[in-house]
Image (cartoon, grey):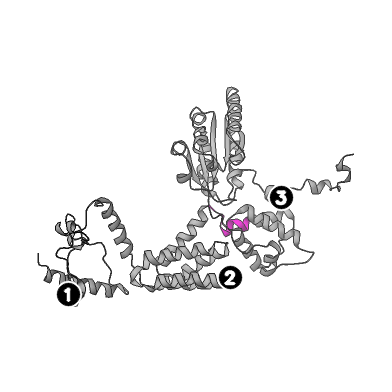
Amino acid sequence: MSDDLFAPRVPEEVASRRPLADRLRPKTLGEVTGQEHLTGEDGVLRRMIESGSLGSMIFWGPPGTGKTTVARLLSGEAGLAFEQISAIFSGVADLKKVFEAARMRRMDGRQTLLFVDEIHRFNRAQQDSFLPVMEDGTVILVGATTENPSFELNAALLSRARVLTFKSHDEESLEELLKRAETVEGRPLPLTEDARASLIRMADGDGRAVLTLAEEVWRAAREGETFDIEGLTRIVQRRAPVYDKAQDGHYNLISALHKSVRGSDPDAALYYLARMFDAGEDPLYLGRRLVRMAVEDIGLADPQALVICNAAKDAYDYLGSPEGELAFAQACVYLATAPKSNAVYTAFKAATMAAKQNGSLLPPKHILNAPTKLMKGEGYGEGYRYDHDEPDAFSGQDYFPEKMGRQTFYDPPERGFEREIRKRLDWWAKLRKERNPR
């Protein structure tokens, strides 16, 4: 006897009820929200359709910005057959089947728009397989990616496709989506004004996410109930926008944090640090980045910067989360308000380049040890002056290989502690000229 006989019966109206995001999917390009630069009256895609000539394209943008929907609508308005595959679930055999079906349609006079979701997931060889069918017109390829195409897609593929950038939804377009949802549902969203704004922030520019969150709220609300921010957080179990640490959002925020510190803006730096914590970033990753900022952008202008960053890491290890996050916040503010210098960073890069170019040169013999009679006979150690026996504990002798001559890599600015270092270097330079006049 079939197990289906014992399965609970689901009313047809419930079984056929599609998710809200699917029911609100635009039916024309004109209904697409948040991508007016592409789909509006003067948008790039609108102009392509009017010209009657579509070329292959790469849609690049965050999740939930309408890439799949726009591709489907584009094929309909251009009168093209629509094929969709995902690079996650498809292989070479699937591609061959799709290409063959497209060739058959083309023989019947109809072109195919092939939409490839997550196209960056295909390896280089698989990406190359698209080139012949793009060149002979078998398919118009529309690839979708959340990753930067410049890094993830073959140059040959990019040279044959135009990259169109999809933007994250702003608050205005997400609000418009919520209003459409309320119209379809025939009821208002049971949220206070502040909670509604919080829900929009939680969606983090993702149209599908804002509709999914709204649907969760409607499901959870009892008759006459309205949620405030605390109630919303409890219902949807989400605190803040979450980004994929392998995608651009991760790198954009850490870049913004680093540049805010470098720009001596502690408020902006704290904001980006808090966003990354709230999004679930690994605290030790943030700790490592703060250490990097200390050595790259503060350096010896404030030698305590590195000490404080390492102390913040120890404090986090001791306190854990969330209490230990305050130690990183303190380090972040210290770095942002410290005097800035990349002098050591620049000097090390220059010294590294010089080492690569002159790596075969021996140091001058007078600073080399002479452990054997032969080496002493060759002049090793001859003429070396012990600095502690010299006036001011400074001999001023030359330490570079003779063929290189004296070099200058480190040029400290007149800022912070490096002002003191500059005084010392200037003093030693003066003594060096007096004691070694040549």
- The residue under the point 33% across, 70% down is 300
Residue 159 x, y percent position in the rendering: 44, 37
Residue 283 x, y percent position in the rendering: 53, 64
Q: Nearer the viewer, mark 1 or mark 3?
A: 1
Q: Secondary structure at mark 1?
A: loop
Residue 347 x, y percent position in the rendering: 29, 61
Pointer 3 or 2: first along the chain: 3
Q: Residue furthest top?
A: 107
Instruction: Identify the residue under disc 3.
Output: 19
- Camera-side residue: 343 or 388? 388
Real-space CA distance between mark 1 and mark 3, rounded to the nearest whole angstrom: 84 Å
In the image, residue 302 sits, relative to residue 179, either above or below, namely: below
Pointer 1 or 2: first along the chain: 2
Contact check, label 1 and label 2, Cβ < 8 Å: no
Q: Nearer the viewer, mark 3 or mark 2?
A: 2
Does residue 80 show up?
Answer: no
Q: Which mark is residue 322?
A: 2
